């Protein structure tokens, strides 16, 4: 759909406009422009179809399962369309409603049959969009929804339900910016219904604390939809400070996924966060925060020459495992020049000196992928297999000795030193997984030798 729209014009930057134009293509242009159909004079127009789809979506969100359900009975669907057509003065409203349901399914691809005499939107994006449009219509045009009801009944009742988040975001993008800012401010001050989550999600206090921040995450998402932020700059600044405060005071209170989401919102939605990210990378006591902050810097600021030099200087002095792991990934993904003279020595240093088995293993894998034929790599990997201090604690851990040995076998399997080391590991390695793997490799070599 986006490709079709982009053939004629630049895609709208506003998502609500994008969804509106996509629905126009399906409801009108697909028939008239593409299929060249001659529509009868009394045909139901695109505007009427959009208004009816708004009513259907709003009806769904008011149902027992809300937006999550994306389900409406055929009887209720027919009644909504029939009532609308009667109010608009169409003749034979029930017959037209039945034909319209078939058209929306088979020609417009907006609705689909879900079995058991029920229907739903083909893609829930349209459900969320039309629901948001109807909410805004009742608020701005019909005036049946006051701002207080919009705030308390729509946002207040549904902000904890993630199936509503997209519609709430779209509403903020469609209403007047100052009012949208007030809704963002309202979300910032909400607190989770702890008794509800303790009852429904009894897996521990850490998860509960993570859930309690969904108001800030949604507030940031809603703020990102506001096109003109001049009038809400103070709210925007306070929201940024609240998000940063949660990251700075992480201290293992929250899930790693939540911290990633917080940092992602900060760097995606707010300008000039580079100095703060550098501070987190350099000074935060959490290895994970250091790692995630560096990855966000690389993702959003890798084009900056000053940032590149800062990162390389920082990477050379990295001691924490999170900083080391980030340094490896960023050097590999974002900085390619002078790889062999800069990246290879750094990777070798990590494999030799890092206290974290995961960092050593990642670095060894990158050496295999990028530098396996470089001078001195074979001898270096032989030393890793012979001396890496890995001790297995969990079955899922990756042994850097195995990673190095696999790299040698894939490219240096005719070297006598490699074969001797493989035989030694099959018998003497302290890791039972590596011993078993080495024995299989030897057996496969013997089988291939016998068959030849």
Image (cartoon, rainbow, N blue to C red):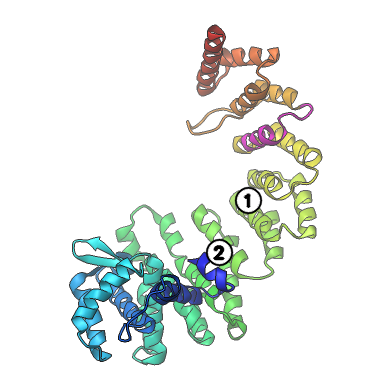
Residue 368: which quarter of the image?
top right
Residue 308 against residue 425 in the figure, above or below: below
- Identify the residue under disc 1: 291
Residue 381: which quarter of the image?
top right
User: From the viewer's perspective, is 375 left or right of 417?
Assistant: right
User: From the viewer's perspective, is 300 left or right of 429?
Assistant: right
Distance from label 2 to label 1 (Cα)?
Answer: 16 Å
Is residue 85 part of the magenta span, yes or no?
no
* Residue 97 visible in image: yes
* Residue 253 visible in image: no
Among the two numbered marks 2 and 1 on one chain, the one whose residue lies closer to the N terminus:
2
The magenta region covers 361-376
35 vs 159, nearest the viewer? 35
What label sits on residue 198 in the rendered view?
none
- Identify the residue under disc 2: 246
Q: How many numbered markers are drawn?
A: 2
Q: Position of residue 1 (x, y in %)?
A: 47, 66
Q: Position of residue 371 (x, y in %)?
A: 72, 33
Circle 2 SS class: helix
Q: Nearer the viewer, mark 2 or mark 1?
A: 1
Residue 73 against residue 347 in the figure, above or below: below
């Amino acid at each position: 759909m986006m490709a079709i729209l982009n053939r004629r014009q630049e895609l709208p930057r506003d998502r609500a406009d994008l969804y509106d134009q996509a629905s126009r293509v399906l409801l009108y242009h697909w028939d008239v422009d593409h299929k060249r159909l001659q529509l009868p004079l009394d045909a139901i127009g695109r505007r009427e179809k959009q208004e009816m789809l708004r009513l259907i979506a709003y009806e769904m969100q008011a149902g027992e399962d809300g937006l999550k359900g994306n389900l409406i009975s055929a009887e209720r669907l027919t009644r909504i369309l029939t009532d609308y057509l009667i109010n608009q003065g169409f003749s034979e409203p029930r017959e037209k409603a039945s034909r319209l349901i078939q058209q929306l399914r088979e020609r417009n691809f907006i609705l689909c049959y879900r079995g058991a005499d029920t229907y739903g939107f083909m893609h829930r994006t349209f459900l969320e969009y039309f629901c948001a449009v109807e909410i805004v219509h009742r608020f701005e045009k019909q005036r049946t929804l006051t701002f207080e009801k919009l705030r308390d009944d729509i946002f207040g009742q549904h902000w904890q339900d993630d199936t509503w988040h997209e519609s709430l975001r779209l509403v903020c993008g469609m209403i007047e910016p100052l009012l949208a800012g007030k809704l963002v401010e309202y979300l910032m001050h909400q607190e989770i219904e702890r008794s509800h989550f303790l009852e429904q999600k009894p897996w521990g206090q850490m998860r509960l604390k993570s859930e309690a921040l969904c108001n800030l995450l949604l507030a940031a998402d809603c703020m990102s939809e506001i096109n003109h932020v001049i009038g809400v700059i103070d709210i925007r600044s306070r929201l940024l400070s609240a998000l940063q405060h949660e990251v700075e005071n992480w201290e293992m209170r929250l899930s790693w996924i939540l911290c990633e989401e917080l940092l992602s919102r900060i760097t995606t939605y707010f300008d000039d966060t580079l100095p703060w990210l550098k501070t987190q990378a350099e000074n935060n006591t959490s290895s994970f925060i250091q790692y995630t902050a560096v990855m966000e810097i690389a993702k959003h600021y890798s084009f900056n020459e000053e940032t590149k030099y800062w990162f390389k200087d920082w990477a050379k002095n990295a001691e924490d495992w999170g900083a080391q792991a980030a340094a490896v990934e960023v050097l590999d993904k974002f900085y390619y020049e002078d790889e062999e003279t800069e990246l290879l020595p750094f990777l070798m240093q990590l494999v030799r000196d890092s206290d974290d088995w995961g960092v050593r293993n990642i670095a060894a894998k990158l050496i295999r992928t990028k530098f396996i034929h470089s001078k001195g790599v074979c001898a270096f990997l032989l030393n890793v297999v012979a001396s890496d201090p890995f001790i297995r604690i969990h079955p899922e851990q990756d042994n850097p000795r195995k990673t190095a040995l696999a790299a040698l076998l894939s490219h240096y399997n005719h070297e006598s030193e490699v074969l001797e080391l493989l035989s030694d590991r099959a018998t003497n390695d302290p890791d039972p997984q590596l011993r078993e793997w080495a024995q299989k490799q030897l057996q496969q070599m013997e089988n291939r030798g016998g068959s030849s």
